[in-house]
Image: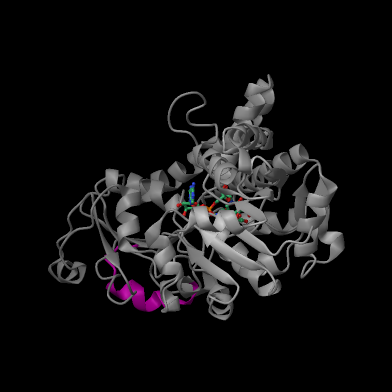
Amino acid sequence: MLIKNICCIGAGYVGGPTMSVMAEKCPDITINVVDLNEERIKNWNNPDLDKLPIYEPGLRKIVEKCRNKNLFFSNLVKERIEEADMVFISVNTPTKTKGLGAGKASDLKWVEACARQVAQFSKGHTVVVEKSTLPVRTAEVIVSILKEVKTSVKDTEKSKTFDVLSNPEFLSEGTAINDLLYPDRVLIGGENIDAINSLVQIYKNWVPKEKILTTNVWSSELAKLTANAFLAQRISSINSISALCEVTGADVKEVSRVIGSDTRIGSKFLNSGPGFGGSCFKKDILNLAYLSEFFGLPEVSSFWESVVNLNNWHQNRISRLITKKLFGTLSNKKIVILGFAFKANTNDTRESAAIQICKNLLEEEAYLVIHDSKVKLEQIEIDLNKNVLGSNFKEKNKSNFFKGGNWDFAEDLSEIFHNADAVVILTEWDIYSELDWKKIAKIMRKPAWVFDTRSVISIKQMDNSNLNFWQIGNGSI
Ligand code: NAD
Ligand code: UGA
């Protein structure tokens, strides 16, 4: 079956970029991205491309080329589902906060709502594609909703039919466009060979055939959770070793280089940092742990849960360490936080290590000046659950008045270091590796500290700076 019209439900970090790339590579297919969030859609349609709701290198150019040609963003969920012969479900699947499985299981209420919308509004035959990351066997739930709702619609619409495929997304934020253009693999799980082929044909427009892997639906759903769990496990593993390096005189960068040159281990994803963040690692591992428990495998469950536990411990370890180095008290001390996003090249702060670390420092009565050139002040207010101080922090620096347990926001780096007791680098933005520490040292209050949780500073840059320096996993300083 030849797909001519696609509807993607969910215009988020996955739906927006994925459909933009698909639209560019498949000019003969009309692609409609729909969302309930009016503000988000307004921003996707903003003529000023700086206002796109998501910051991803390369995204702007593709949206500029395809928008309103074969790529459309709207809130018209019903109408666009009606027209589509393939519907991608790309909505959020956060951890449940209440009821059965709270704190671990995925909340599927948005996915369920999509299935109901598709069952109600679709016409003729529709291929429903799970793009969201879902617990293994979710396709079963979608199929049963599609079947049940179908029987309750008008007689004239009973001819509608469906196929359900799993096509999880492996893109990383910050490199989403590159990951979508040149994926390591595309995964399609399904039963009906015609439905599978219809999606294979789409990807074949730009992905080499040998990189398109087809499996049964359950393997596809589980492979996505497993991939994230393995990646996160590597980070917890190297972060655990960083703590050991610090007390033994070893350097985690050297340890990573050595183990990474073993081709069986490989060199990627071995950078120790402040702990993994992002919207998915934690939720997907907790979901895997929940599923393991549900299927009667408590040992498997606790194995995976320990990856998240180590990550929580590691984030708290960093804030405890900062407090200890600053004589056990942060009261009346100014700390500059460089970076709030969960990694560089994204404006996303979901589960960013910066959130827990800043909360801990505020709890210790520190005064924080937080800089991030892509994250908005309003987002940090939501994440810290604490409003920004109202007055201008530059004035306060001059009068040397810091209000403990509070924070200010800095859009640029000028003047933020005045009278600071410490600088903590939490995101690896390029600009932070180019700072002139000798100059900065002159305006900080002594004894002054620099804490580099991302290894963006080379020890040489610190020579003769008169700054105390700590770097993640570096026991040789
Ligand atoms: P997101 O929160 O950025 O976007 C989801 C969007 O879906 C929101 O804008 C929301 O308004 C919309 N939505 C929810 N229910 C809807 C409905 N019934 N009708 C219309 N719109 C609806 O989420 P995201 O980061 O794009 O993630 C989506 C899925 O992809 C998740 O399952 C996630 O685990 C997975 N995933 C995310 C990434 C990533 O890098 N963010 C990568 C791979 C996979
Ligand atoms: C991750 C996966 O890499 C994607 O394949 C997956 O599609 C996605 O989750 C998802 O399902 O949401 P993402 O969260 O965007 O992508 O970003 P990553 O590059 O994986 O980084 C996650 C976290 O790990 C970040 O906080 C990052 O700073 C940290 N990290 C990563 C390290 O601390 N060290 C590393 O070596 C790599």
Residue reaching furthest to the front:
156
Residue drawn at the location 24% of the way across and 67% of the way down: 419
Which of 171/201 is in front?
201
The image quadrant that residue 291 belongs to is: top right
Q: Which image quadrant: the N terminus?
A: bottom right
* Image location of residue 110, percent across then percent down: 50, 42
Q: Is residue 48 left or right of residue 273?
A: left
Ligand 2, what quadrant? bottom right
Residue reaching furthest to the right:
210
The image quadrant that residue 52 belongs to is: bottom left
Task: Check the image and tell me how it is coloured.
Answer: one colour
Q: Is residue 11 left or right of residue 196?
A: left
Was residue 447 drawn as part of the magenta stretch in this picture? yes
Which of 309/33 is in front?
33
Evaluate whether residue 476 shows in this view: no
* Image location of residue 339, percent across then percent down: 42, 63
Which of 227/344 is in front?
227
Which of 87/321 is in front?
87
Number of marks in picture: 0
Residue drawn at the location 33% of the way across and 74% of the way down: 412
* Image location of residue 119, percent across then percent down: 59, 42
Region in magenta:
433-449
Q: Is residue 283 left or right of residue 367?
A: right
Q: Is residue 462 left or right of residue 201?
A: left
Q: Is residue 295 above or below residue 37?
A: above
Was residue 258 drawn as part of the magenta stretch in this picture? no
Q: Is residue 144 above or below residue 6?
A: above
Residue reaching furthest to the left:
399
Residue drawn at the location 43% of the way across and 28% of the way down: 98
Evaluate whether residue 223 shows in this view: yes
* Image location of residue 248, percent across then percent down: 59, 46
